[in-house]
Amino acid sequence: MKSGFEIIPFLFIAMCLCAYSFAQELPEIVIEDADATTTINLVAPPSDLFDASEVDLRLPNEAVICRADEKMTIDLAPPPDDLFDASEVDLRLPNEAAVCRADEVVVIDLIAPPEEFFDPAPEVKILSRTPVLFVPGLLSTEIRNNEDLLWLDLEKVFWSTPDDFLDDLSFQNDLTPYNDALSLGQVIKTKIIPFYWDYDYSQGLMDEFAGQGYDVNEDSGEQTFYTFPYDWRYGASGVYPKPENTSQRDITNSDLLAERIGQLAAISPMGKVDVIAHSLGGLIVKKYVAQISEPKINKLVFVGVPNLGAPLAGRALIHGTDFGVFGLNPQELKKISQNMPAAYDLLPSQAYFSAKGAWLSKVKPTTVFGINQTNEQDYVQTRIYLAGVGLNGAATQNAIDFHSEFDAMLAEDFLAKEIDSYNIVGCKSATFSNLQDWVNPDGTHNHYDFFDIANGDDTVPFESANRRLASDANTLYAPAVKHGQMPSFDGIRQKIVGIISGNNIAVPNGKIVARVQLLADNNLCRLWGTAIKIESPLAIKITDQFGNIIEDVAGIGPKNEIPGAAFEIDGAKKFVYLPQDTGEQYQIDLQGTGDGLFTLTTQAVKNDILQTPRVFGNIPVGFETRGILEIGDQETILKINAGGNGPIDQTFSQDDNLSVDELTEDFDRYVDQGLIKKPQSKIWGGALRSIKSLLAVWQKNKNKESGKSSLALARAANERIDSLIAQIGEVQGADAKTSRLLINSLERLKLK
């Protein structure tokens, strides 16, 4: 029990405070400085306000108050559970109450306090309309090193081949940044390299909102459209560093988002905020909604959200990628991603495997040349593989924990919290889907290949973005989009602003597909086009009917301006996908970049499925070689001019049905080029002529009612084809590429 002497100082302080409070005609006393406000009811203080275990006596007319970094309003009836923490005592009345964490302690004379100390809270100005907050995606907030722009300084990226100036963005093994002095800039609006890259991320969206009467000016005092810059490196699962030897709780990007939404909700006429969340920003918003009992969101528009992850993140960590940033060195991005939480948050989750399937495969050649064993890695095998190539185990586990908690969020979860949710999904753009690890016969790594494609928005596969985050009526699809520019993409920006403002804004035809339309015709969101794969030395340049260009810019990297198209370069290999379902027209020019041979393969893509390949194999090429490729539904034609000027020297044609005459012409060309040597050239040539004769007999008799059985002839022809395939696979009578071409052609020659 306290003695009377112990109680006297507290009673005196309480009487002074109460007297001041009543003089101000307030039931509570407001203690405020420039940075923090705390309201304490001194008539009926909280039961746990005073802790007698640690008495910190002051003079009767003094109290210790803290100055805080963050201004907040505290409701003490009842107070938050984590408000009073005896381990961090910073504000002490005589019997000690922990109210906030202090950076500076001052002693206030309560008999004659400073005039500016007891200052009623300023009047809050309410906005004219519900504020809008745009939460951007990965790579979309500028980061500075002191005053210098680090991300995204396009001039440095453009002129620096290794891009190692970006090393300052890296994280350490413990998932903390190497350079903790970096600061945030603004959300990226546009990035332009004249004649090369015109990237509009959020400017078009802002302009569209401005056109509907929203104030986008940060200095106007009437702003109603806001952006949320954040450090995207931490992703959704990353935790910001905190001072040592403190009990400060973990802070994530979702916590910072909650603070920003709370600030805007306080000045909103309806006490809520309309939110637009793109890409990684959608994962952060989902976490905020799940963890807040009453999230202050009115309308929520998801745009291109990788709910279940994206294989491109795995490729970035294992092999490297430029994430569509023109001129960025893929190996630099691989280097800085190794311990970056965001890269791991975007890895395909366990639910991805159920929705889409494996994204990682091991390919191993067998003893029969041209026949490979492909082993698609399931979820567990993929985790083991990622650990084996040295990825960060803690970051992997954090991402797994995140997805296990939030992947199952559905439209009902948002509706239950009175959020009107919408989901805009990109489709009809070729999207990376599978990383192939080609291994040697002994199982060791040889090389990576990644030219398989899937339907999506060129970054996020369709199945990952197309989650039921909204009702059917509020689920929309955007064909032929580029993920990195979705917020300002023509059609999407108009739809977003129309949803938020409630105004009827015209959307260009074909740019947005309603879910009811897609259910009636799924072709509206499927891939229809042609995939082209080139094994160098050959450069390709493609121009569509609108003047958009695909090309490899020397010393910089791939340039792709064509909507819905894909363009990848990996060493000597090039891959292109061109959409062909809405009357697109292309001029495809080829140019030799060295002396040797090139192989070009085209494959039609119909309803998301790759069709029979058309292969132009082992074509001679030199620096002066020029060519034209004409792709059609029935036939693909390759025209070559060896000298670079003048008429076409050679014309090659391929269609879905390979004839024995076409195969024989290819075989004779390989022999002339010295790619098939004796005695195999003679033995295999004889076998091929025998197959040709047998097929001629089958062709003559296949429709006759009498005579030799066409079925028996077909079986005999296929047996001879299989025999020749086995010979080519077992004998090293040709180089590897030529043998593979012959085997693939013979497989196509078989009678079905």
Image (tube, helix red, strand yellow):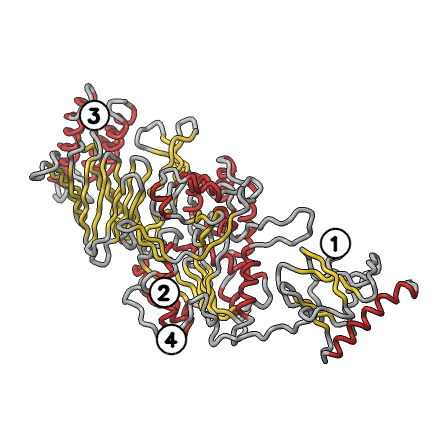
Q: Residue at x 40, y 38 (%)?
A: 331
Q: Residue 150, can we see it?
A: yes
User: In terms of image quadrants, where is residue 294?
Assistant: bottom right
Spatial distance from mark 1 to mark 2, Cα to Cα?
Answer: 50 Å
Between the residue at mark 3 and the residue at mark 2, the CA separation in whole angstroms equals 55 Å
Query: Which of the marked residues, 4 or 2, is nearer the chain's N terminus?
Result: 2
Q: Position of residue 275 (x, y in %)?
A: 47, 66
Q: Nearer the viewer, mark 3 or mark 1?
A: 1
Asked if labels 4 and 3 touch by Cβ distance under 8 angstroms, the answer is no
Q: Which mark is residue 675?
A: 3
Q: Quadrant of the N terminus?
A: bottom right
Residue type at mark 3 is Leu
- Percent x, y for residue 144? 47, 49
Q: Quadrant of residue 434?
A: top left
Most distant residue in the bottom direction: 25
Left or right: 597, with 388 as reference point: left
Q: Mark 3 or 1 closer to N-term?
A: 1
**Contact? badges 3 and 2 (CB < 8 Å):** no
Mark before the other along the chain sequence, 1 or 2 = 1
Label 1 SS: loop
Question: Above or below — where is 279 with respect to 495?
Answer: above
Closer to the observer: label 3 or label 4?
Answer: 4
**Residue 192 screen position, x and y as percent:** 32, 53
Q: CA distance from mark 1 to mark 4?
A: 53 Å
Give the crowd class for mark 4: few <14, some 14-19, many >=20 residues within 10 Å.
few
Q: Nearer the viewer, residue 675 or 174?
A: 174
Kindly identify which numbered label has been placed on residue 503. 4
